[in-house]
Image (cartoon, rainbow, N blue to C red):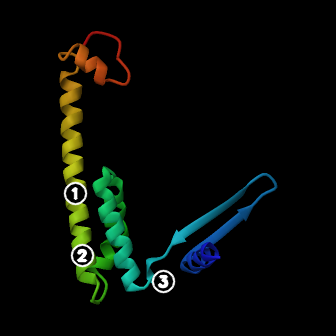
Amino acid sequence: MHIQSNFTDCRSLCNLTTFTNTKWTYQETNMNLERLPNDEKLSLCRKYYLGGFAFLPFLWLVNVVWFFKEAFFKPAYTEQLQIKTYVKRSGLGLLLWVAVLTTWITIFQHFRAEWGEVGDYLSFTIPLGIP
């Protein structure tokens, strides 16, 4: 019974569009932050922020994209300061991940052949040809 009430709550918060054909059904869901109460916005923003620490930097990207307007362009409300903090930290964490990943990819592509067997073990596919 509790699952049904959560589904009903979600349906009231999301815009659902359903397309039906004889062979398939497509349902599109658009999340609308305007319909969420401020405390739930803060909770969702915090979950995405903390989820990014589980080596999921994509969650930080989603957090920044979804909550940027909410944090910096909406009229002030009590939870906005905390949302702004989570958005800033998510952006910083995302930039750090991009910098580290770009550095690693550049170093690996440049030195993989020189590393010999270790470079081959770290490779998913071994390119053919002269290094």
Q: Is mark 1 in CB contact (under 8 Å) with mark 3?
A: no
Q: Residues within 10 Å of mark 1 (few under 14, many from 20)?
A: some
Nearest to the observer: residue 29 or residue 53: 53
Q: Quadrant of the C terminus?
A: top left
- Residue highlighted by disc 3: 35
| Residue 53, percent from left and from top | 28, 56
- How far apart are the two marked residues, 3 and 2, measured between alpha carbons? 19 Å
Q: Quadrant of residue 29?
A: bottom right
Q: Classify the position of the N terminus by image quarter.
A: bottom right
Task: Report, in whole angstroms, how far the alpha carbon at label 2 lies from the one at label 1.
Answer: 14 Å
The residue sitting at 31% across, 84% down in the picture is 74
Left or right position of 2 against 39:
right
Precedes in sequence: disc 2 or disc 1: 2
Q: Amino acid at mark 3?
A: Arg
Please tell me whether residue 88 is drawn above or below residue 117 in the rendered image. below
Please state if 45 lies on the left or on the right of 1 as rendered: left
First along the sequence among labels 1 and 3: 3
Which residue, given by chain and number where applicable, does mark 2 sit on?
84
What residue appears at the point 29 percent right and 89 percent down from the top-left corner? Answer: 75
